[in-house]
């Protein structure tokens, strides 16, 4: 170790190589000079050590010191961070600031997996220069996000603080604003939705002892009288088979996984949030069992070595039969999707077996990726779709069935591909069958469905806002700010008020087209058709007028937000369970003397009720919409700093009867414990290298 930071050293024919990890961004954007934290707008910035910008990042200072010390007298530098925008930026800032301008003479290492073979190959074929245009796009993204985020968030927070005289963390930004507005628009659409009635006709026939459900040819009958007339006309009558049509169709294999499609499938099958899927995929990548997950490509390159990967998979018991079946083919041609990413191919398994124990989420995601990889080499599946039409007078009914003729790729993707088979009744054209049952059912047109994490992520992707790596983080931020709640996402009153204020004073921030345009400009920086400075100047010229309007409307904004924050805070602290002694509402309160928090009865002054319950004194409390199975009291979630959370019942907690400790499925990584995101390689002369000490 050097300065408390672990590094590695190996000897080559050309000299010694020192490998030191970076734990994400060691440098970030901060205010230039001394500026009070409540000052806005802020326009002057520079890049600083993250330990100088964020209070919780002081431990990162030792990484900068260690890398700077190890880099002294080095004759060669290599940026071996993840090959994407963030990795390019991390390496650039470390080489430029910690290694004192080494970015001008550094090389770039490009790889998509952490296997020994690919890392050795990448080191042998170093790019002679850094991918500066990609890093410049990353710099511009961080600078714009910082300028938008810090100014808009301070405007909301400080305007509220001046009116309310108590702190409430409010935030928005160029990606967060449009994303929140998607949820708010859907919430308002649901609230204003007026259900319209319609009727469906449900009918059943029986043939050879089996019952078959029929659909009326008109899926929605608009009036009750028309629906009842259909029932009267057909009840107890025979239906004549008018036609039986059967057609075959092929279903092509699925596209290889990019990150959004992997997140969508993981949500559909395992109910993993997008951020959890990304975290688990990154752990599999670091374990060298899958390729780099932060990719938008749905293409697998020809030189990937399909046969070698499949051969390695065939050595794993659970995949041996399926992989062996694919290897019989003389030519391996995978299905390719439309999307491409110049940095990385689609997500695929490396073929190497896991070297350590996998958690259940890791096993599930690894199995999903492996089976999807095998499925893209499968043949199209062949199915038949049959439709039988039956009539009585002017009324037509349908029944449909499907059958699998050739499973094709679905055999390899099972159990994630669902294949249903259903048979038609054994009837031919002209034959008659009696209706066993027919009824009209009243239904109502339903409002549009609420977003979940997966559908909101997909909406962001369709609007071209955010990146494949940051979209899930944006959704998590909305939850943390109290803007959205529940898995079927609901916008809170605070979210609706913030969107209304932004729509009135700075509608540009809510416009997904504006944010998508910025993403296009960042892409142009990568392609070297624009410069970072030009994009900053062009964007900030619009943003300055937005901030001017917000500053002018500060009092109006603050008074509106103040009322909403106070109402939501009260709502968040009020329990659904009433006081068992007097029936008044119960609230989470804090003692002015001891500063301890507890549950107290709001009927204390009016009714003299002294009912109270203790609460855990650590972590952040959240009232859950769930009840204790033992006493029916509302449950409380306590999130502690670190790796655990606790769900407890405040009423049972008194007697220490019910307390459940749950382990976080995706714990927050401790940078000191798990260096993970980047590697900086420094080559030195043998005599100048310090001995490696564990």
Image (tube, helix red, strand yellow):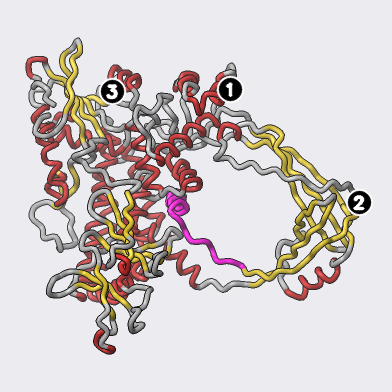
Quarter where residue 480 is shown: bottom left
Residue 457 lies in the magenta-colored region = yes
Judging depth in this view, the residue of 594 and 152 nearest the camera is 594
| The furthest residue to the bottom | 606
Helix, strand or loop at mark 1: helix
| Residue 299 as seen in the image, left or right of residue 149 | right
Q: State the CA–CA distance, disc 1 to disc 3.
A: 39 Å
Residue 181 on image: x %, y %: 40, 62
Circle on res. 431: 2
Circle on res. 127: 3
Give the residue at x 23% y 36%. Answer: 675
Helix, strand or loop at mark 2: loop
| Residue 227 as seen in the image, left or right of residue 553 | right
Circle on res. 325: 1
Residue 640 lies in the magenta-colored region = no
How many residues crowd mark 3 within 10 Å: few (<14), some (14–19), many (20+)?
some
Query: Mark 2 or mark 3: which comes first in sequence?
Result: 3
Circle on res. 681: none
Residue 235 on image: x %, y %: 84, 67
């Amino acid at each position: 170790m050097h300065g408390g930071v672990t590094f590695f050293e190996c000897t080559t024919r050309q000299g010694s190589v020192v490998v030191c990890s970076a734990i994400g961004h060691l440098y970030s954007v901060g205010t230039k000079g001394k500026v009070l934290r409540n000052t806005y707008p802020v326009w002057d910035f520079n890049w600083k050590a993250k330990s100088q910008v964020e209070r919780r990042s002081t431990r990162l200072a030792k990484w900068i010191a260690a890398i700077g010390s190890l880099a002294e007298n080095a004759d060669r530098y290599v940026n071996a961070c993840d090959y994407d925008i963030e990795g390019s930026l991390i390496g650039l800032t470390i080489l430029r600031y910690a290694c004192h301008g080494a970015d001008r003479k550094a090389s770039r290492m490009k790889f998509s997996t952490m296997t020994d073979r690919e890392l050795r190959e990448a080191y042998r074929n170093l790019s002679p220069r850094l991918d500066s245009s990609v890093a410049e796009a990353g710099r511009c993204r961080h600078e714009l996000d910082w300028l938008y985020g810090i100014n808009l968030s301070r405007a909301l927070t400080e305007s509220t603080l001046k009116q309310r005289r108590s702190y409430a963390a409010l935030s928005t930004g160029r990606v967060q604003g449009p994303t929140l507005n998607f949820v708010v628009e859907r919430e308002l659409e649901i609230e204003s939705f007026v259900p319209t009635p319609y009727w469906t006709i449900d009918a059943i026939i029986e043939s050879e002892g089996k019952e078959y459900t029929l659909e009326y040819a008109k899926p929605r009958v608009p009036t009750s009288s028309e629906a009842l007339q259909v029932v009267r006309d057909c009840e107890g009558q025979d239906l004549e088979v008018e036609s039986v049509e059967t057609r075959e169709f092929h279903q092509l294999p699925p596209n290889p996984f990019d990150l959004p499609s992997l997140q969508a499938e993981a949500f559909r099958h395992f109910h993993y949030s997008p951020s959890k899927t990304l975290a688990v995929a990154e752990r599999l990548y670091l374990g060298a069992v899958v390729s780099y997950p932060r990719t938008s490509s749905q293409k697998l390159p020809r030189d990937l070595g399909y046969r070698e990967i499949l051969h390695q998979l065939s050595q794993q018991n659970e995949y041996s039969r399926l992989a062996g079946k694919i290897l019989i083919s003389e030519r391996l041609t995978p299905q390719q999707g439309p999307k491409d990413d110049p940095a990385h191919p689609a997500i695929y398994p490396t073929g190497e077996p896991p070297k350590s124990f996998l958690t259940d989420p890791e096993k599930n995601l690894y199995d999903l990726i492996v089976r999807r990889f095998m499925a893209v080499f499968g043949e199209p599946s062949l199915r038949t779709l049959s439709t039988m039409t039956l009539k009585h007078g002017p009324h037509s009914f349908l029944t449909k069935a499907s059958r699998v003729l050739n499973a094709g790729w679905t055999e390899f993707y099972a159990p994630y591909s669902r294949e249903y088979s259903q048979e038609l009744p054994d009837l031919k054209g002209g034959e008659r069958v009696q209706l066993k049952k027919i009824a009209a059912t009243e239904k109502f047109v339903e409002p549009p469905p609420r977003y979940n994490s997966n559908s909101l992520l997909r909406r962001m992707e369709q609007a071209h806002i955010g990146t494949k790596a940051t979209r899930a983080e944006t959704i998590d931020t909305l939850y943390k700010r109290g803007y959205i709640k529940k898995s079927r996402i609901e916008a809170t009153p605070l979210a609706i008020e913030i969107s209304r204020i932004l729509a009135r004073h700075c509608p540009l921030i809510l416009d997904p087209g504006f944010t998508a345009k910025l993403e296009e400009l960042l892409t142009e920086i990568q392609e070297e058709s624009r410069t970072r400075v030009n994009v900053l100047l062009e964007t900030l010229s619009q943003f300055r007028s937005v901030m001017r309007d917000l500053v002018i409307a500060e009092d109006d904004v603050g008074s509106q937000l103040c009322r909403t924050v106070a109402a939501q805070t009260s709502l968040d602290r009020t329990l659904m369970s009433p006081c068992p002694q007097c029936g008044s509402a119960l609230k989470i309160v804090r003692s002015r003397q001891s500063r301890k928090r507890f549950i107290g009865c709001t009927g204390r002054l009016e009714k003299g009720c002294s009912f109270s319950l203790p609460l855990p004194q650590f972590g952040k409390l959240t009232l859950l919409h769930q009840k204790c199975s033992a006493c029916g009291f509302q449950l409380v979630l306590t999130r502690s700093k670190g790796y655990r959370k606790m769900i407890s019942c405040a009423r049972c907690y008194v007697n220490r009867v019910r307390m459940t400790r749950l382990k976080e499925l995706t714990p927050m990584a401790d940078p000191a414990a798990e260096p993970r995101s980047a590697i900086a390689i420094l080559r030195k002369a043998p005599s100048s290298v310090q001995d490696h000490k564990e």
